[in-house]
Image (cartoon, helix red, strand yellow):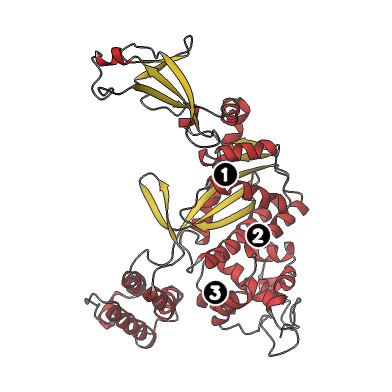
Amino acid sequence: MLQPQISFAFSPYTALYDLIVPKDNMLRQINELVDFSFVYDELKANYCMDNGRNAIDPLRMFKYLLLKAIFEMSDVDLVERSRYDMSFKYFLQMAPEESVIDSSSLTKFRKLRLKDLNLLDMLIGKTVELAIAQGILKSTSIIVDATHTKARYNQKSPREILQDRSRKLRKAIYSIDDSLKAKLPVKNTVDTLEAEIEYCQKLVEVTETKLGIAQLPKITEPLNLLKETIEDDVEQLRISKDQEARVGHKSADSSFFGYKTHIAMTEERIITAAIVTTGEKNDGKQLQTLIEKSKAAGMDVKTVIGDTAYSEKENIAYSKDNDIELIAKLNPQITQGGRKKEDEFEFNKDAGMYVCKAGHMAIRKAKQARNEGGKNKRTIYYFDIEKCKACPFKAGCYNDGASKTYSVTMKSDEHSEQGEFQESEYFKAKAKERYKIEAKNSELKHRHGYDVASSSGLIGMQLQGAMAIFAVNLKRILKLVE
């Protein structure tokens, strides 16, 4: 049964917070800045309002997940820290002497209470609304990009992951007392998952019962991480790899296995929209949805800044129809007319014909459509085959008995206009703002654990994205307000 607990529980020790948690503490500032009561409105449908045992306050559970996104901690360590860290207790609206939840409750909350929620759009919308209310969101431009996140599973074998985490625990133990090596179990040498699990279980047992150092902060985190792997991750890993993750490409010769998060961000560096997809999805295809989501969040979008991936013809036409400036360079193939062997054929502007490297000019040209509907038109230039037969460069250029042509893909009207626009000084100046979103992607990955998925599946990735983006937006708003 849900009974909201919006205010602090009565306690004679509540005044301690004013003495211990300073006014400029980030968590205190977030508490004062954000009205979290929206959590009740969004989650009440997933609770029984008048029957059963009292549920843990959903606002508190939500705040636990936000702390997890801000500080990148395991469930166990997060709850343990909330036992003694007064800034955590203050943020969670706990009385100083109040007991903490069981860490397993967080897993249940994620799976049972947050299901069927469009949490990503909802949380981004709340932060954009807050930024507008604070008067710090004034831009009419959004910068778009995609960042990749590796799947949690199948990056390494289950045995390799256990080896990595047991190695971190041993390293922490050695740093405290190198002589403790002699008390640790002998490392596993059998190449099976079962043998590695058995070794890790022995390592955990020895650390907790015989070394007398399990409660030291330096040992606690790697120990809990290894235990969590044995008890939770291995079961998932043994079943299969992440079924929803896909292979995507960062460049022509590098790839990743996982997901993409397509992001729109203002010039003030506040994220206004995000779409989580599997790794193989095309960046440019998400642009129109990012713009519509940004508008729905409260943005007045007049300009979009992105890389070449967003300059496809459909996006140019959409931007024009909606009076939006698209600051995205065309693919070089389009600006150059989509032609091959550029060093062998040169265009004679006076004759309007191409000339081959032997100096022979085309004798005629014709326009042709590749597909039905006249799309992807090209111009075909025909050469005099009698000259080709006697040409000293015919090898690799002309085959006996065939005609000799050279084709150039024609630019559409949309591409022609965009090509002229991208040569303007205004375009070049606005394009320089794109670096900001690359820095934001780096912040998500390196400060909020967004480089690797915290769970399997697209839904889990969307939840991770929602909490991470909510966290970085709140931090940015705090900085701008200051």
Question: Given the image, on which type of amino acid does mark 3 rest?
Answer: Leu
Question: Given the image, on which type of amino acid does mark 2 rest?
Answer: Asp
Residues under labels 3 and 1: Cα distance? 31 Å
Residue 159 at x, y percent in the picture: 31, 73
Query: At x 29% / y 81%, what residue is drawn?
Result: 194
| Disc 3 and disc 2 in contact, CB within 8 angstroms | no
344 relative to 136 in the view: left or right: left
Residues under labels 3 and 2: Cα distance? 26 Å
Residue 192 visible here: yes
Residues under labels 1 and 2: Cα distance? 22 Å
Residue position for label 1 = 436
Specify the quadrant that holds the N terminus: bottom right
**Callout 3 secondary element:** helix
Residue 434 at x, y percent in the picture: 56, 40
Residue position for label 2 = 121
* In this rendering, the label closer to the viewer, 3 or 2: 2
Residue position for label 3 = 78
